[in-house]
Image (spheres, rainbow, N blue to C red):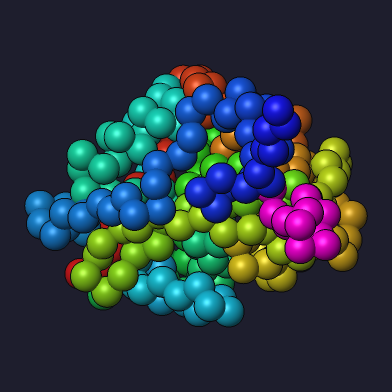
Amino acid sequence: MNIEIPDNWLGKPVEGALERALRNPNPTLPVSDSILPANNTGLNKEDYIILPSQTHGDYIYGDTLVSMKREYLGKNWDESWNLLKSDGAYMLNIRQFVDFLKLLRSGNAFDEHGNKVQPSRLMELYNDITEVRDPWRSEWLDAKFNIQVVGKKWAGLVNKDVMHITYHIVNSQGVLTEVNEPLEHYLANDKIPGINLDDWIMSVNKHGLPTEDNPDGELYYWKPVDCRVARFDASSGGTGLLCSGGPSFVYSLLGVRPARAKI
């Protein structure tokens, strides 16, 4: 008696299923997971900068309050997320983080009271994030990477591993929803060093990652790796965008910059 094993089961490819399960024992939250941020009452609004709404292709986010401080130091990625959610806040994703750096460099930003933040203060914040000096500083970013298999052999296509990114979007009511999308047009190789910091800030893909044509520079870049997360580091040894970090990593000067929907 011959038993025919199907190529797909409930819309999922059968081939490689065991390997994928072993590779990702802690899958990300489902796409339908939603978080409702607080109404921002009781905040010291002078501690937050307004990151104006932006449109990047089909990705749109509204006005966002971004903390001038890294908080929840010494927590891993998941712990940071849980603390943020309990406080009605969330992480900046990589695209928002790049826009935040660009805003700081512009010297033209406002707090939630509508007061202009002094350009010297903005440059101080920018240098704290990016300057090559001690002590080591780092902050988690809202990006988790995972490989998914696309293609169907029976349709004449070849199965292919495609890197995806999981991050969050915020609607006009401040509801935070997780999305998972394939990465496109990004630099898929490590550059140690490096990519050009100015070019990365001014010219990135939809998800905030450098593109393949980013010129050489001193910003260390580690490509996305399956089941890893993103953070930005700076120290006397250089600066770097790390997309291959373990979510369980902990260090006393590693924190997160809370963001909140401006509602």
Q: Is residue 182 left or right of residue 158?
A: left
Residue 174 position, x and y percent, is: 24, 65
Residue 206 position, x and y percent, is: 62, 68
Split into 4 quadrants, where in the image is the N terminus?
top right
Q: Nearer the viewer, residue 226 or 252?
A: 226
| Magenta segment includes 49 | no
Displayed quadrant of residue 24: top right
Q: Nearer the viewer, residue 239 or 174?
A: 174
Q: Inspect this view and state whether residue 263 appears.
A: yes
Q: Nearer the viewer, residue 76 or 10?
A: 10
Q: Residue furthest front?
A: 1
Split into 4 quadrants, where in the image is the C terminus?
bottom left
Q: Residue furthest left?
A: 42
Residue 187 position, x and y percent, is: 80, 55
Displayed quadrant of residue 228: top right
In the image, is residue 32 above or below residue 69?
below
Q: Is residue 99 left or right of residue 222?
A: left
Q: Inspect this view and state whether residue 233 appears.
A: no
Q: Nearer the viewer, residue 111 or 165?
A: 165
Question: What residue is drawn where x is 21% and y is 39%?
Answer: 86
Question: What residue is drawn where x is 21% and y is 49%?
Answer: 88
Q: Is residue 262 left or right of residue 121?
A: left
Question: What residue is drawn where x is 71% and y is 70%?
Answer: 203
In the image, is residue 170 above or below residue 33?
below
Residue 164 position, x and y percent, is: 62, 51
Q: Which residues are magenta?
A: 148-160
Question: How many numbered marks have been drawn onto this rendered protein structure?
Answer: 0
In the image, is residue 104 above or below residue 148?
below
Question: What residue is drawn where x is 21% and y is 54%?
Answer: 37
